[in-house]
Image: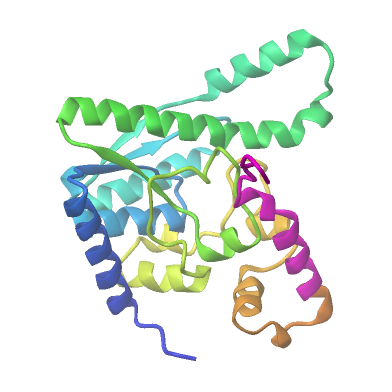
Amino acid sequence: MKKFNAETEVNNIVNFVKKYYKDNNLGGAILGISGGKDSAVVAALLVKALGSENVIGLTLPCHSASEDKTDAKLVSDYYGIELVNFDITNTFDTFKSELHNLKVFTDEETKNSDINLKPRLRMATLYYFAALYTALKGKTYLVAGTSNKCELYVGYFTKGGDSVHDISLISDYTVDEVIKIGEYLKVPDKVLYKKPNDGLSNLTDEDKLGVKYSDIATYMEDKTLLDDSTKEKIEKLHNNNLHKFNIPTYKKGE
C-alpha cells in the first residue's frame, strides 16, 4: 500500500480548488461547521486555497448539544473565518407542530423522518446564505460538502441534505486519511479526535452504522481481511443505499 503523504494531498486539493475557482470565476465558500473533524478539515483546506476572508462558516443548531457550537467557534477562531450562528430550532419545531396538527402519525413513526429533516433544513439554510453572500459581496459563493469516503460508501448521508453541495474536497479520503490531513493542517485536537456523531440522534456514527469506519476503509481496500459478519454488514449498508447515488430517468423510446 502506498504511504499516505498528507502534505502532498493538501497541496493537490488546494490546487484543485484554486483552479476550479479561477476557471469558473468564483469567489468564496459557505459551509456548515458542525464541531467535528470533517467540516473542520474542509474549512482549513478552503482557507488555504481561498483565504480566510472568502470562507464563511455557519453553525446551525437544532436541539443540538452546546458543545458543538463551542467546538465550531474553536475552529473558526483558529482559522480566522467568519462564523454565523443561525438557529433553526424554531423552524424545525414549526414543521413538527404542523405535522402534529394532522393527528395521524406517532412520534415513533416520525423519528427517522425527524432526524433527516434537520440536515435538509440545514442545507436549505446554507444555500440561502450562499445566495445572500453572493449578492452582498458581488462574487459567487459555493456550498462546500463535508462527507468523507467511508460515509459515502455506506450511504451515511441524507438525500436532499448533506448530499447536496457544489464542491467536495474530502469525499475520496477515508476517516483515517482525513485525520492525517487534519493533523497536517493543525486542526485543534479537541475537534480532530472527537468521536464522530451526527449531532441529531445522540448516537455515535459507528453506533448507528453498526460497523467501524476503520472496517469500512479496510473493506474498500481489501475485503478479504475482514470477517464474514463485518463484510455482510458493510455490503448490506452499501447495497441498500445505492438509490441515493443515482436518479433513474426514463427516456422516450426505452
Q: Percent position (x, y) of residue 24?
A: 21, 48
Horizontal side of 19 relative to 225 (left or right) equals left
Above/below status of 188 relative to 145: below
Horizontal side of 144 relative to 243 (left or right) equals left
- Rendered residue at 28%/77% (across/down): 7
User: Residue 40 sits in which quadrant?
Assistant: bottom left
Name the residue nearer the viewer: 188 or 238: 238
Q: Is residue 161 magenta?
A: no
Q: Percent position (x, y) of residue 173?
A: 46, 69
Residue 75: tell me if it is visible: yes
Q: In the image as oriented, which residue stretches furthest toward the front?
A: 253
- Rendered residue at 40%/34% (across/down): 126
User: Residue 152 sits in which quadrant?
Assistant: bottom right
Name the residue nearer the viewer: 231 or 37: 231
Q: Which residues are magenta?
A: 231-254
Horizontal side of 119 relative to 216 (left or right) equals left
Name the residue nearer the viewer: 46 or 66: 46
- Rendered residue at 80%/71% (across/down): 232
Q: Is residue 253 magenta?
A: yes
